[in-house]
Amino acid sequence: MIKLKNVSKKFDHEEVLWKIDELTFPDTGLVVIHGPSGSGKSTLLHLIGGLDLDYNGDILLDNINLKKLEPARRDHYRFQTIGFVMQRYYLLEATSIKQNLLLPLLAKGITKFAALKKVRASLKTVGLNKNINQMVSTLSGGEKQRLSLARALINEPKYLLCDEPTGALDEANKKVVLEILKKVSKTRLVLLVTHDLESIEEDADMIVELKNSRFHLRKQFNVNNNSLVNIKVASKEEAKLPLKFALTYNFKQLKRTPVRAFITNIVTSLGLVGIGLSFILTSSVNKRLESALQGVSNPHAIVMKAKAPNKNPPRIAASKYQVQSVYNRYSHFFNHLGALYEYNFEANFKDADEVYIANVGYKVKLPSFHIRHFSEYLHISEVDNTSFYPKFQGELALDEVILGIPTQDLEQIKTSRYLHRGATIEDVGNTLLNNQLTIALHVANDDWQYDDERLFLVKAMFASDEAIVVHTNPLFNEILLEEEMRLKSTNTFEGAKALPWTLTKSYYLQAKISPFKVIEHFLHELSLSNYVLHGVIEKEQPHLYKILPTNNRLAFFDIGRNYYSHAHADQILSLSEEVNSYYAYSESIYLAEPDLLMSGFYSPLFLSGDYESLNEALNAASIIHHKDEGVDVIVPYNMLKAHYSIRGKEGLTYATFAEDNLTKGRGPTTIDEIVISTSLYEKLFPYQDFKEQSLYLGYLIETRPHGVNFVQDFYKQAKVNIVGLINHEFYGIFQSPAWLNIFFSAYFNLPIFSTLTSGFVLDVNSNDIEALVAKLNQQFFRFEFSAPMNDTLKQISNTLDNIRLGMLFIASFAVIISLLLIILINYLTIKERINEVGLLGLIGFSAKERVKLFIVNGILLAFIAFISASLMLVVVEVILNKAFINLGFGAAKLTLNPVSFTAMFLISTLIGVLASYISTINLSKTDIIPLLYN
């Protein structure tokens, strides 16, 4: 039963077209809706059928308001319950009678045998005695209308909505159609819209007339309200467009536009052939390298570099969220998260930067304390709380601190509290129990018109050589400087700051274990490869660098995509049996020249077993000298100066320690332990039997200008322990793969961004180094593995690479053109077949299923292009191979491989899907009525 209550429809959202107070249509019978043309009769059918939802009031079909259903369920209800017959036939003209009638049946899941049986019965019902394989386009108007009626009845709908079904028919066909409608109205409700009442008035069970924007009941309904099968709208299964139908239908459409299909196929095929050829050329280059690389000078080393390295990444600190995420994942490594600031407090707070006692009648300065001490404070876990006076446990408020008091400041506090000069730190500290000590931090810059003062209650103190501020909050400095003092911060460490009061900030995690072990672990973790970690640097946090008991604060920087994660080298080590070990090198620490495999330390490095001798050599190397001339230091016989310019047996090399090569002693277990070659031990400790010894290192860390034309070198020292020997005729140091980066950054306090990995040196045990290079290049395509090769082969390789890149460019261009072309073809096809799309919606197919028809069309076009391209690729491969042989490059013979065809297939599929998706974006959002009447 259909009920309408208080339903009104406006024209262009303003003028009321018509209004219905209350109208009920029972389950069966022939109901005629009559009225003049253009009065809105068809609109009423659209509302009842759920094709138009732009109305006011309630329309209920079996107590279901289609307007309130989700679009897919509304389409499903229409598919199961409603049949439409229009004045225009809305048939699939390019298909047969059978296919038009089978479509809704197969979409319903009926077997083909049962569906065919139903097709014949339906045709018999409407009196259409035709060959079911006859094309629709050959039928007469009356036959098409009866076919349209048969399709509307094929799913046995409960409601049949007919919009002027006889308007375009002659009298004979009109009479046939009306007889059929009268017959089927005995078992279902037929709503018939017409402006020709005479031909149907006598047979109508109920007549509703539209007059003066109102519907009037002219003839009372007088039949039994026999309901048909109850339709279960709760079912969420929607009508599925059969894939076979979509393929057959689209293929026939392609045959109707052969020129368009041919042009699309040629352009797409050419693009795919170019891609296939580029893959073949890549494979051929690798095979050529495998057969041509001969006579490599050092067969036991390969240099591994990224093809697209992230050179000179900007120095940007990781965000708080990023660092917190790392902490949450690796909390077993860290104690807490904190903030570090790099800022010239002394220069920027030039008008005031002082700390004084605030709760006495006069100003008593604490001369050692400044704002830097609050920025570079210590967390309470980093100090010995047993030396606090008075004893302190618990948490500090933001305006409470613990102070490490140097002697001169202690004297000032004694004076302010009238304590005798012999009072100890314990005496002074214990007075805090009964007599509060309040200090003020005062900073100012008159140029900025900035002046701020913060008060702090001192809860405890302890003796210290340096002024120290202690707090329990790991983010005390961040809250104080940014929230309380309103200073700005940035995580970018390069370039000019927008405002002079902008501090450069990074976040750190305090390591529970050795920070070097943490760094080494992170270097080998691929998911963390975008982070660079380093401890406190003297230049950036000078006060903190002095007072930290251990440099275990690891600041996090984000360098983006890192092509030099040790995890990549670890993967190669685990997957390739020919690779024994590897080590990382850095252009600012240790160089490895790719072509000649030349290696050595970037800056001068002095090694000595005697501390005093090393000091003398470094003092000599640090003299002021002309910027265009170096300092030639003659070192003692038991000292070594290492540099990449010093080659051969006098040069110092680095390699990864392998337990199997150990001759004496043991392997290194900490960062300050190394294994050296027997020849280096004999150089540094002549005529001495092996024992674990200290080795002192001096490394050039900075060259500063001294006047206009002169400079001075500055060296930093470090100590390591020699714990083992490896028998080797060259001078060598052996440690872990990441030791160079970690040790030089930590012990020589080099900025971590100057020590980033530049590549890896692989030690291999292959007799065929050329084949191994080719194999590694093929397996790990993001990296470039190189060994020495002659200039001629390089030129050939470069030429072929350029050809490949050119073909990729041309192929990519062709692919883009083909993508645009298929989008255009699909768009034109949709425009041409827009009424058929509307027909699918009328039948009850959802928007997703209607779009599927054109997605299949796009994929079909792309698949045909793939088949054509595959055949073309075979022909091109034969032609090019003949040309190579004629030119004398038979070794560069191209070989077809599955990768080429796989790439072509994937890209063709991608083109088809993407083109279809783009061309059907608007289609999925378009209502059915505009599709029907376009």
Image (cartoon, rainbow, N blue to C red):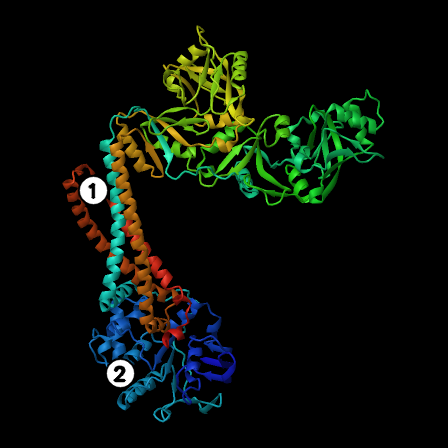
Relative side of 232 to 781, left or right: right
Above or below, 326 against 649 in this view is below
Q: Compute the Cα span from label 1 to label 2.
A: 61 Å
Q: Nearer the viewer, mark 1 or mark 2?
A: 1
Q: Looking at the picture, how far across and down is residue 802, in whole percent?
A: 28, 43
The relative height of residue 332 versus residue 932 in the rendered view (above or below) is: above
- Can you tell which mark lies on residue 894? 1
Of label 1 and label 2, which has the lower sequence position?
2
At numbered mark 2, what does the secondary structure look like: helix, strand or loop?
helix
* Mark 1 element type: loop
Q: Hey, which quadrant is residue 372 in on the image? A: top right
Who is closer to the viewer here, 327 or 73? 327
Check the picture and name the quadrant holding the C terminus.
Answer: bottom left
Using a 10 Å C-alpha cutoff, classify the residue at mark 2 as few (fewer than 14 neighbours), some (14 to 19) or many (20 or more): some
Q: What residue type is labelled 1?
A: Leu
Amino acid residing under circle 2: Gly
Residue 68 appears left or right of 192: right
Determine which of the numbered discs, if any, sits on residue 543 in the image. Answer: none
Q: In which quarter of the image is the N terminus?
A: bottom left
Q: Which percent across, then down, holds residue 709?
A: 52, 26
**In front of the other: 236 or 528:** 528
Left or right, 618 with respect to 934, comes to right
Circle on res. 141: 2
Question: Percent position (x, y) of residue 328?
Answer: 54, 39
- Residue furthest top as drawn: 687
